[in-house]
Amino acid sequence: MRTILGEDGRARCAWCEATDFPLYRRYHDEEWGYPVADETRLFEKLCLEGFQSGLSWRTILAKREAFRAAFSGFDAARVAAFEGADVARLLGDAGIVRHRGKIEATIGNARALRALQDGGRSLAALVWTYEEKPEPPVVRAESSASQALSKQLKKLGFRFVGPTTCYAFMQAMGLVNDHAEGCWARAKAEQARRTFRVPS
């Protein structure tokens, strides 16, 4: 993992310094790698990582607001109630990725989440049992923790949650700190994790 020095004098993870796509830097500086316990944000990110499968995160990030509008702000209760007409509507929405399997998986994932919650559990408490302890970042597509999380989510009825998707989710939601050594945000993410209250 390497860093690039921005024009503001801050060293950042190299992947976020696409000069023609400033959303990358904002996402890196303000969101990526910081711990999250909010159910809606976790559900949204899990679904968006599923939509990213086979595509770039740049594509998904550029369409994120359209995804939020299309999927009722990723309110699981509302998305779980989507029916055939909603699938047809979403397939006609040029603002999102129009992939029937991923659309239907998002609706199914909302239903799986509602079933989890109806059973007295939360997505936050579930995913945070797979937190990885701080260590120097390495370039990898998955980990033993993401493999275990993927297996558990699939067991609960979630789809498009393979080990690579789960690892990207873990990176983004702060379950692992993969900011590069020397990136200014790495220490900020570590501090956020030290003060974060792990859901139970």
Image (tube, rainbow, N blue to C red):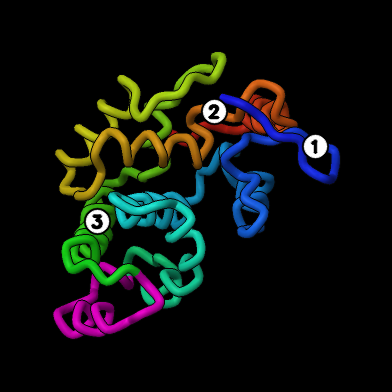
Q: Position of residue 140 (x, y in %)?
A: 40, 25
Quickly name the residue at label 3.
109
Q: CA distance from mark 1 to mark 3?
A: 38 Å
Secondary structure of the residue carrying numbered label 3: helix
Q: As shown in the figure, which amino acid type bears the numbered disc 1?
A: Arg
Q: Along the polypeptide, which appears first: circle 2 or circle 1?
A: 1
The magenta span reads 78-96
Is 108 drawn above or below residue 200 in the view shown?
below
Q: Residue at x 46, y 68 (%)?
A: 63
Q: CA distance from mark 2 to mark 1?
A: 17 Å
Secondary structure of the residue carrying numbered label 1: loop
Quickly name the residue at label 2.
178
Q: Which label lies toward us, 2 or 1?
A: 1
How many numbered circles does the render carry?
3
Q: Horizontally, is 67 left or right of 176 in the view? A: left
Q: Position of residue 151 (x, y in %)?
A: 20, 32
